[in-house]
Image: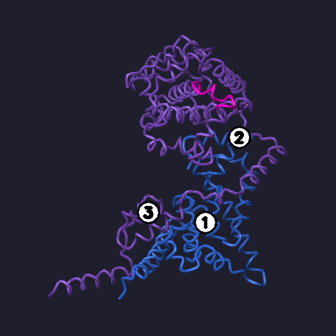
Chain colours: A purple, B blue
Amino acid sequence: MSDDDALAGDMQRLLRALTAVPPVADQATVERLLDGRLNPADAPPGYAGLARLLAAATAPAAREELAGEQLVLAEFAAVVQSHPPTPVPRRATVLTKLASVKAAAAVLAALLSIGGVAAAATGLLPGQAEQAADQAASTTGAGVAGHDVGEAAVAGLDGAAKAGLCQAWQAGQGADSGRRAESPAFRALAVAAGGADSVAAYCQDAAAGGAAATGPDAMAAARAGLCRAWQAGQGADNGRRAESVAFQALAAAAGGADKIADFCQTTTAGSAGTHEQGPSASSPSVSPPSTTVSPPSSGPPASTGPPASTGPGQGQGSPPTTSG
Amino acid sequence: MIGPLFPGLLAAAQGGDEQAFAVLWRDLQPAVLRYLRVAAPAAAEDLAADTWVSVIRGLARFNGDEQNFRAWVFTAARHRAIDWRRQAARQPVQPLPLALVVQQAAPDDPAAAVLEAQSTRAALALIAQLPRDQAEVVALRVLGGLGVAEVAQITGKRPGAVRVLAHRGLRRLAKRLEAAGVAERGVTR
């Protein structure tokens, strides 16, 4: 049997394999294809073309697909004008009202105190800063904005989160851009900017609009928000929380998971709300004060006062892990 | 997917913040439009706009996380597509949406176009050629980024049926593409 014959035989088998029904991929492969988690290069025989098709179908947005934005936003504005929003089920107890006022005050205080917090912000490593910036929106944003807060506070936090992201983005420029570009926070930033290549201009606008002034304070707000969420969740599914990116960031900022309590006590100490803190913050295992029990996504951040109220010079507990 | 920022953005949008809503829209609109190119190709753009109008009107009452939000938006899109197909079926002259789309996207065989250019439009046209049930499930799973349970809820099918339809759809597509691939590479002799 010559080499040619052998080759022809191989070719025949290959052809049969290609033209016949593709081999039955195992369930896991199909699920990975459906989830878009299968690189075309890794697709099993018979599925490479399919993997490419699915990749093409889920390719990044083309400009023409976003062409209708102005029309949709005009519709949004019209609806908002004709039906002033009455967000989420209102639980307008005295407590939540109080919390709303506090939250607004927190934003205001954050806007006013820049100096002391810049140090706190630089104390966070770029990666942590980015995660913390993430959290500025998800904890403070969700916890506060979802609950009957004045529109000013919503807008302020939104701006702070944006400025925080921009600041983290600018701080990290030139350093491992690839990794940053893949993080959810920066993808969100890219989406907000209308494209990854528009982030610089977008952040410039944010700075020009005065939002940059809140940049460093977004970190403080993020820390306070993280601490609040951590305190609120104490005793409740600790395992899950410990694994979340947010709490890893908090642990990193605190210098260790076992130091979070002290760290958060320092972060929130001196605020108007500290009478509720009591001794509970000294140990991670102690249950939180009653007013803070509600989880971050459903309860008002009633436990803490203005996150930046420790003010310049008091050091927000001084950057704990400046060495890293 | 927006991820950790989603709850804050949603809350802000529900409070009337246009920029926050714009972020939600930019994130999801391409997927909605692509789903509709599969489900109702000739009217996809209009139906996507209609979908967002209904989302905007219901936004203040929406309650849930990002996956819930996606499922909610795609439910609205699907209703638009079903209404449109019903109307189109009543019209005396049947439009030929698929042929049009295929022509626009890829003058030749869409399967070959997918392999060559990785064109999104051609890929969607190919998915749209599947039997409707399969096309819908594949589109919701792949384009919508929705899980089996969510697709089952949206389409009113059992999760097992959704799985079977998705697998059949993918196998059919794979077969089609492999055949095109063989022809394209000139392996046949």
Subunit bearing disc 2: A
The CA distance from mark 2 to mark 1 is: 27 Å
**Amino acid type of the residue that numbered disc 2 sits on in the rendered structure:** Val
Residue A202, image x and y in percent?
63, 40
- Give the residue displayed 67% in from the left and 71% down from the top: B40
Name the residue nearer the viewer: A77 or A240: A77
Looking at the image, is A99 positioned above or below residue A141?
above
Q: Which residues are magenta?
A: A207-217
Residue A14 position, x and y percent, is 31, 80
Q: Helix or strand or loop: what does disc 1 sit on?
A: helix
Q: Is residue A247 left or right of residue B158?
A: left
Furthest residue toward right: A82
Label 1 sits on what residue type? Thr
**Which numbered dot is residue A88?**
2
Identified at 55% across, 80% down, the residue is B108
On the image, the x and y values in percent for residue B120 come to 56, 66
